[in-house]
Image: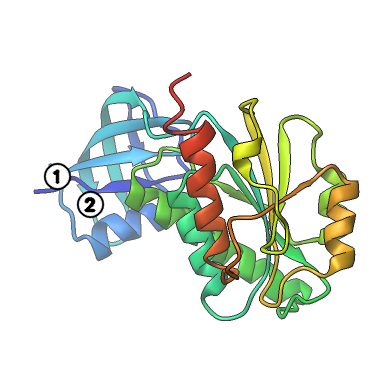
Amino acid sequence: MRIPTIYTQTDLTVNIETELETSSAHHIANVLRMKQGDKVRLFNGNGFFFSATITQSSKKHVSVLIDSSEKSLTESKLHTHLGQVMSRGDRMDYAIQKSTEMGVSEITPLMSERCELKLKAEREDKRLAHWQQVAISAAEQCGRATVPKVHPVSALEDWLAQQSPKGLSFVFHHRDTQSLTQIHTAPTHVNLLIGPEGGLSEAEIEQAKKANFMACTFGPRVMRTETAPVACLSVLQWLWGDFNLD
């Protein structure tokens, strides 16, 4: 039987019996229907996996004994911060889910000139909580021991101004001619800006360039807003992250 991997917010220590918080307990007891004596693998975002045995399982309470821990080998050495202009429907969910699978470190939902999703304060809080849960579920599925932080929604110009000058920053669009193969020094940190359906405006691209974002292309075809971060992160991981053996 496959041992499930579950995210928990609880502090985990080897040889210590711990009661899990309500959300994790509900998932283990009521969704997975696991019982006392069953094995589970836990992580709380600190980069380690914890093997545990369930010592108590009821509808509202689950306790585990932490048997051992091991450092995750699934995290990329390339730190990536995705600035993703928001979109409607499940496209934003898809972008966050697949970016998490591709090893993204941080995600900031952005508002731009052509952004088609407008959120008021209460609705924004609910969407952020939902998107963070999407990232958690994706991390559980793909075997990560850390969860990308989904930051509060930011205006594009504010996000551009806040990005650290360390590493490299890119804005991708099909109208440019520069490609990543022209970059010869491998970074350890990358900021990545992806526009909405309809793309970033010329003024926004120029604004990004003034903030030291390099304009690059992946070719002449126009990608959907939820496809672009997956394609970009795949190439970044190939060049400088998961498969860079230097």
Spatial separation of the CA atoms under disc 1 and disc 2 = 10 Å
Dot 1: what SS?
loop
- In front of the other: 29 or 92: 92
Please report the residue visible at 54 percent of the width from the left and 45 percent of the height from the top.
104
Q: Is residue 118 above or below residue 174?
A: below
- In front of the other: 24 or 58: 24
Q: Which mark is residue 226?
A: none
- In front of the other: 185 or 19: 185
The three-letter amino acid code for the residue at tag 2 is: Ser
The colour scheme used to paint the residues is: rainbow
Residue carrying label 1: 38
Left or right: residue 149 versus residue 134 is right
Q: Position of residue 62 (x, y in %)?
A: 29, 49
Left or right: residue 220 versus residue 137 is right
Q: Nearer the viewer, mark 1 or mark 2?
A: 1
The three-letter amino acid code for the residue at tag 1 is: Asp
Confirm or deny contact between disc 1 and disc 2 (CB under 8 A): yes
Q: Is residue 104 above or below residue 207?
A: above
Residue carrying label 2: 57
Left or right: residue 104 versus residue 138 is right
Tell me if I can see residue 171 in this picture: yes
Please report the residue visible at 48 percent of the width from the left and 43 percent of the height from the top.
103
